[in-house]
Amino acid sequence: MKLLDGAVVDHGGSLGRARALFPNALQPFVDLSTGINPHSYPLFDLPATSLSRLPEAARTRDLTEIAVSTYGAPSPANVVAAPGTQILLPRVASLISPGKALVLGPTYAEHARAAAIAGHAVAEVDNFEALADADLAIIVNPNNPDGRIIERDRLLALAAGLRAKGGLLVVDEAFMDVGPRQHSLAGDVGQGGIVVLRSFGKFFGLAGVRLGFALSDAATVERLETQFGPWAVAGPALEYGIRALADIGWQDAMRTALAGESARLDALFGRFGIPVVGGTTLFRYISLPNAADLFSTLGERGILLRHFAGRPGVLRAGLPGSELEWERLESALAEWASRREDQSKGSKR
């Protein structure tokens, strides 16, 4: 069990940090350090009123109704929209009195930080069964960064045990749009003691829109809505959320495309002896002894992967967004592999 505090942690997607690390790198960077879809939902002309007027409550209701259909929640009373899931984390952690918060790790570090901010004593555990001892149990499903899946029946059993003692299960389903949706708890939140988080920006490739959802029982949703007050979600975010969540055809086609591209990335890594050991179709999780060298070599060539402090043997790679980016990645990998071969031959002389 690893004890955690509320310290700010590093994340992928920071081009400023990339420039500081690799000041002489070829630019623009090919940023593969996030799990955000590089093929965003098509942009469209927004109605002028989405910018010039305060958001209408009716438009927010439209969004939550569509979210019910898309995510499989019981009813609009079980969904609250927010300006991104990040802002929800400390609020959700504060739904129960401070106690023992256990996070199934290794995973997205912001959950532990948010729980600590809410006053919980936080620890990371690597054993699912250990979560039964928590007051607040937090699971990312599919997990970031390794894609681990916890089955729905196991989650429901855990939720029942926590609920019986006044605890709470939080399941972050930020990547469930490209995961095995039969293991989502979105349809089960009405039972109580469960909060499911859904992210809009990752799958739809519109992280800057800042839109996310919490799904829970009606009383919990009402508590969260009261905290946010009116106009929590900006007008442009409402418009993009309504249109994109309703566009099932785009979603189905995108899932197929992402599956093909993730298989292509696996094959490319495989050509150069880089094992892919997990992930989702939006990111791949790789493990190798000299991962730090791969990170640095690619970074110097303007290819940014996600590395993790304290876990030097693993990396996460998102999908290239264009053929030019694929070519740059392939070229950088070939150079890395050639250098390794030269070093190996030199060591045998």
Image (cartoon, rainbow, N blue to C red):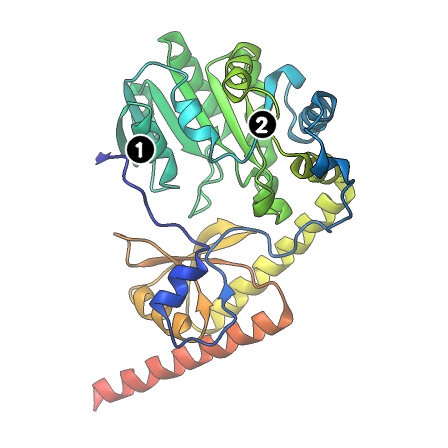
Q: Which residue sits at x=75%, y=39%?
A: 248
Q: Which mark is residue 232?
A: 2
Q: Give the residue furthest to the bottom.
A: 349
Q: x%, y% of residue 101?
A: 31, 25
Number of marks in the rendered image: 2
Q: Which residue sits at x=21%, y=91%?
A: 349
Tell me which amino acid carries mark 2: Ala
Q: Which mark is residue 127?
A: 1
Q: Which residue sits at x=33%, y=34%?
A: 112
Q: Nearer the viewer, residue 188 or 308?
A: 308
Of labels 1 and 2, the one closer to you? 2
Q: Residue 63 occupies which quadrant of the picture?
A: top right
Q: Nearer the viewer, residue 110 or 128?
A: 110
Tell me which amino acid carries mark 1: Asn
Q: x%, y% of residue 224?
A: 51, 18
Q: Which secondary structure lies at badge 2?
A: loop
Q: x%, y% of residue 309?
A: 28, 53
- On screen, 268 above or below 310? below
User: Is there a contact, CB below 8 Å, between mark 1 and mark 2?
Assistant: no
Q: Is residue 143 among what the camera can see?
A: yes
Q: Which image quarter is the N terminus in?
A: top left
Q: CA distance from mark 1 to mark 2?
A: 37 Å
Q: Is residue 75 among what the camera can see?
A: no
- On screen, 282 above or below 168? below
Q: Which mark is residue 336?
A: none
Earlier sequence position, callout 1 versus callout 2: 1
How dense is the environment of label 2, judged by Cα within 10 Å: few (below 14), some, or many (20 and up)?
some
Q: Which secondary structure lies at badge 1?
A: loop
